[in-house]
Image (cartoon, rainbow, N blue to C red):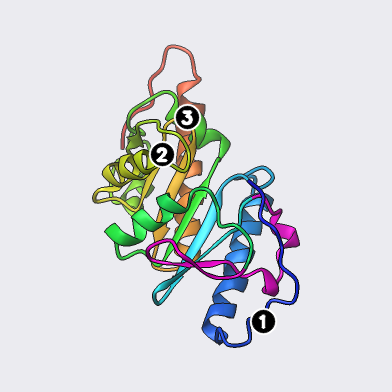
């Protein structure tokens, strides 16, 4: 699904907080591409500003987003800002905001994390950085992207955690701000890469910490 960019949309009454948050969101989304955590427009990012959730729009390359493309919904998912179609994973983001005190959510299709999600039900404890996510990282059962079932599965996997893997799909992390949510995603991908690398050594099994 591709968003349609509207012409001449006036965002002057949205306030500096919203526009600053949008700039930070776009920068974070671009960082996921630059760091190889997503390809093209896969994955999505959101940040909460009061009762509004700013989200990356569907089908628009992040390097083309401008301040005039701000896209936001209320906590019930009704679009209140912009004309671009919000990400198809909006139910996933809204579920996290409803169930946690998160202020930012990052979802990626990171290669190593996605590979691990196809192999185990929980990422083995190969590094103490798992503590930064609340403990062993669980894998949420597979469900179709954008579905309420996926959101429910993710919430169960996130119970007591700030990050999880989505089976055959990718990563989901949240934090108090975009930097924290992104850092948790990057750490999760790194831990998955460590485990896959260690597991590839014949006749040896990675030791838990």
> Who is closer to the viewer here, 116 or 1?
1
Residue 56 visible from this viewpoint: yes
Q: Dividing the image into 4 quarters, which one contains the C terminus?
A: top left
Say which residue appears at 61% left-offset and 52% top-offset: 58
Extreme residue toward the left, this view: 160
The percent coordinates of residue 197 (x first, y second) are 51, 28
- Mark 1 or mark 3: which is in front? 1
Crowd class of label 2 (few under 14; some 14 to 19; many from 20; radius 10 Å): many
Q: Quadrant of residue 156?
A: top left
Say which residue appears at 43% left-offset and 61% top-offset: 77
Judging by the rendered image, the residue that carries numbered circle 3 is 168
Q: Dividing the image into 4 quarters, which one contains the N terminus?
A: top right
Verify CB contact (< 8 Å) between mark 1 and mark 3.
no
Q: Quadrant of residue 29?
A: bottom right
Mark 2 lies on a secondary structure that is strand
Q: Say which label, 1 or 3, has the lower sequence index.
A: 1
């Amino acid at each position: 699904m591709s968003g349609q960019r509207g012409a001449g949309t006036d965002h002057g009454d949205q306030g500096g907080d919203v526009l600053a948050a949008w700039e930070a969101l776009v920068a974070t989304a671009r960082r996921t591409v630059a760091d190889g955590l997503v390809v093209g427009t896969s994955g999505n990012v959101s940040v909460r500003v009061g009762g509004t959730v700013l989200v990356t729009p569907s089908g628009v390359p992040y390097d083309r987003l401008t301040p005039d493309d701000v896209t936001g919904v209320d906590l019930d998912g009704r679009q209140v800002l912009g004309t671009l179609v919000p990400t198809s994973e909006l139910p996933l983001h809204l579920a996290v905001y409803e169930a946690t005190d998160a202020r930012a959510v990052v979802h990626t299709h990171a290669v190593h994390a996605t590979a691990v999600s196809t192999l185990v039900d929980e990422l083995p404890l190969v590094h103490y950085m798992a503590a930064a996510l609340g403990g062993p990282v669980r894998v949420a059962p597979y469900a179709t992207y954008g579905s309420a079932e996926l959101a429910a599965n993710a919430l169960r996997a996130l119970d007591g955690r700030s990050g999880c893997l989505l089976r055959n799909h990718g990563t989901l992390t949240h934090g108090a701000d975009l930097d924290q949510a992104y850092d948790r995603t990057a750490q999760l991908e790194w831990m998955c890469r460590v485990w896959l690398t260690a597991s590839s050594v014949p006749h040896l099994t990675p030791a838990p910490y």
